[in-house]
Image: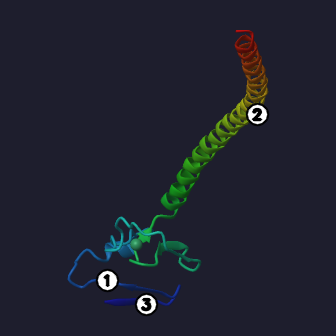
Amino acid sequence: MILTSDSDNVISLWDRSDPNADINEMKNFVEEERRETARYCPHTNILVSEYERSISCRLCGAALDTFDYVLSIAKRETRLDWDLRHLRSEIKRRTESLENLKREEVNTRARIKTAQFKLHDVSLALEEAGEKLLKVKNHGKRGS
Ligand SMILES: [Zn+2]
C-alpha cells in the first residue's frame, strides 16, 4: 500500500501481508533491513558516495561501515608508523656497521702496506745473506 502525506510530501511503502507494517510509520527512526551486501569484503576498491554519505565496495557492492573503514586505515597507518621506526633503526644500525667495515678496510690496507714493506726488507736481507753466503763459499773453495 502506498500512502501519500500531502503535508510533508513523504511517500511510504508497506507490505500488505504484514499486519504490523504500519507500526514503522509511527516511528521516527526505522532500521533499514539487513542488506545482502553487508558482509565481509576483502577488496580495497572503494566507492565514496557524497549523496548517500556512504562508502561501498566497487567490486562486490558491499556496504562498508564508514567509521570501521577509517579505523582500519588508522590502524594500518599505526602499523606503518612502527614499520617505519623499525626500518629507520635498521638503516642506522647497518650504516654504523658499514662505517666499521670501512674503517677495518682502511686499517687492513695499511697493515698490508706495512707487511709488503717488511717483506721487501726481508727479501733484500735474504738476497744480501745469499750473496754473502756465496762469497764465503767461493772464498772457502779458493782457499782449499
Ligand atoms: Zn568487495
Q: Quadrant of ligand 1?
A: bottom left
Q: Position of residue 82 (x, y in %)?
A: 58, 43
Which residue has dot 3 on it? 4
- The response on whether ligand 1 sits within 8 Å of label 3 is no
Q: Position of residue 45 (x, y in %)?
A: 49, 73
Q: Is residue 32 above or below residue 12?
A: above
Q: Position of residue 23 (x, y in %)?
A: 32, 72
Which residue has dot 1 on it? 14
| SS at circle 2 | helix
What amino acid does circle 2 point to?
Val
Distance (Cα) linking label 3 and label 2: 91 Å
First in sequence, mark 1 or 3: give its number: 3
- The response on whether ligand 1 sits within 8 Å of label 1 is no
Q: Examine the image and state in which quarter residue 109 appears.
A: top right
Distance (Cα) linking label 1 and label 3: 12 Å
Which residue has dot 2 on it? 106
Q: Is residue 117 above or below residue 33?
A: above
